[in-house]
Amino acid sequence: MPEVIIHDDESFERALRRFKKKCEKAGILSDLRKHRHFEKPSEKRKRKLSSAVRKTRRGPRVARV
């Protein structure tokens, strides 16, 4: 669970923004959306396969030096 300590000279809005950013990096919201309803194993396989197909269709990523 992300934790944010509010400093004396920091506003609540700024601390809330930092908390939201930490939650986003931790993947809490995406995990919550994923578990919102039950997904059958066949649907999960189908979703992962379509995601993999989309990724390969985009083409290889080129690493820049």
Image (cartoon, rainbow, N blue to C red):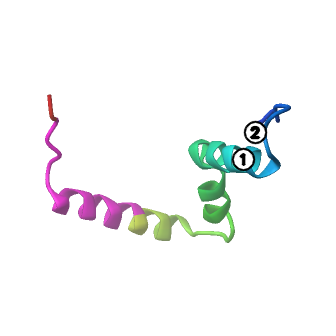
Which residue is more in the foreground, 11 or 42?
11
Q: Amino acid at mark 1?
A: Arg
**Mark toward the start of the polypeptide (2 vs 1):** 2
26 part of magenta stretch: no
CB-based contact (under 8 Å), mark 2 and mark 1 = no
60 part of magenta stretch: yes
64 relative to 45 in the view: left or right: left
Q: Residues within 10 Å of mark 1 (few under 14, many from 20)?
A: few
Callout 2: helix, strand or loop? loop
Which quadrant is home to the C terminus? top left
Which residue is more in the foreground, 40 or 20?
20
- Mark 2 vs mark 1, foreground winner is 1
Horizontal and vertical percent position of residue 32: 68, 59
Question: Could you say which quadrant of the image residue 25 lies in?
Answer: top right
Q: Which residue is mark 1?
A: 14
Which residue is more in the foreground, 38 or 27?
27
Taking 55 as reference, is 38 above or below it? Answer: below
What residue appears at the point 17 percent right and 63 percent down from the top-left corner? 57
Horizontal and vertical percent position of residue 54: 26, 64
Among all residues in the image, which is located at the extreme top?
65
Mark sitting on residue 1? 2
Number of marks in the rendered image: 2
Q: CA distance from mark 2 to mark 1?
A: 19 Å
- Looking at the rendering, the stretch of residues picked out in magenta corresponds to 48-63
Which quadrant is home to the N terminus? top right
Taking 40 as reference, is 23 above or below it? Answer: above
Q: Amino acid at mark 2?
A: Met
3 relative to 32 in the view: left or right: right
Horizontal and vertical percent position of residue 27: 60, 48
Secondary structure mostly taken by the magenta-highlighted segment of the chain = helix
What residue appears at the point 82 percent right and 48 percent down from the top-left corner? 12
